[in-house]
Amino acid sequence: MAIILVALGSNRCHGRHGRPAGVVRAALAALARLGPVPLVSPLFDTAPIGPGSRRYANAVAAIDWPGDLRVLLAALKVIEQGFGRRRGRRWGDRVLDLDIIAAGAAILRAPGLIVPHPRLAQRRFVLDPLVTVAPDWRHPIHNLTARQLRGRALRPKGLPRA
């Protein structure tokens, strides 16, 4: 089994699970039906990026997954659909978003799936919870730990490195 890191996010209420934080908690339970989930970050309340108008509940979970990442991606899409996720505009409001962000040192480019996630290093809403779950995970392309990536993301733009 390999440890796969999955980002979870929600910024729309759900009829059964309530507010976005409840949606993320219910999604974690659905994830656990796919395989053991040994690590889960706290929930983070984050501002939307792009045209979204509502704040997000975000988290990162580590899941033990024995199979192909494309099969896991298909299972995550089924979970999203079960929560009422419909494909729409990019960065719009959504009931649930599940993304495979990393799979150890694996690098994968397949239709509909790029691992590690191509924008992981720029997204605080992923990096903040990721650091609580896997601070020493090393990005296989940037060769930086999650903690180092977060440090770079925190640095004000335009300032030179020390």
Image (cartoon, helix red, strand yellow):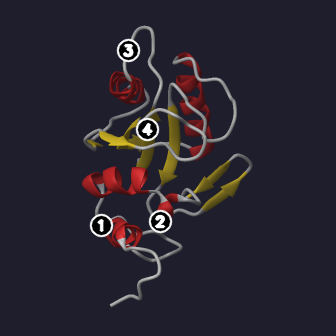
* Label 4 sits on residue: 8
Label 4 sits on a secondary structure element that is: strand
N-terminal-most mark, 3 or 1: 3
The residue singled out by tag 3 in the image is 17
Name the quadrant containing residue 33: top left
* x and y percentages locating residue 72 in the rendered image: 55, 38
Could you tell me the amino acid type at mark 2? Ala
Q: Which residue is located at x 25 percent, y 41 percent?
A: 42
Is 98 on the left or on the right of 51, as rendered? left
In the image, taking residue 99 as reference, residue 138 lies left or right, namely: left
User: Label 2 belongs to which residue?
Assistant: 105
CA separation in Å, label 4 and label 2: 21 Å
Task: Tell me the SS state at disc 1.
Answer: loop
Residue at 53% x, 73% y is 141
Going by the numbered disc 4, the residue's amino acid type is: Leu
Category of crowding for the residue at label 4, using alpha-carbon neighbours closer than 10 angstroms: few (below 14), some (14–19), many (at least 20):
many
Q: How far apart are marks 3 and 4 (CA)?
A: 15 Å
| Distance in Å between CA atoms under marks 3 and 1 | 33 Å
Label located before the other in sequence (3 or 4): 4
Whole-percent x, y for residue 140 in the image: 49, 71
Question: Do tag 1 and tag 2 residues touch (Cβ < 8 Å)?
Answer: no
Residue 61 x/y as whole percent: 35, 42
Mark-to-mark CA distance, 4 and 1: 20 Å
**Which one is earlier in the sequence, the residue at label 4 or at label 2?**
4
Tell me the mark number nearer the camera, choosing from 1 and 2. 1
Name the one closer to the observer, 162 or 27.
162
User: Where does label 1 land, which residue?
Assistant: 136
Q: Which amino acid does label 3 sit on?
A: His
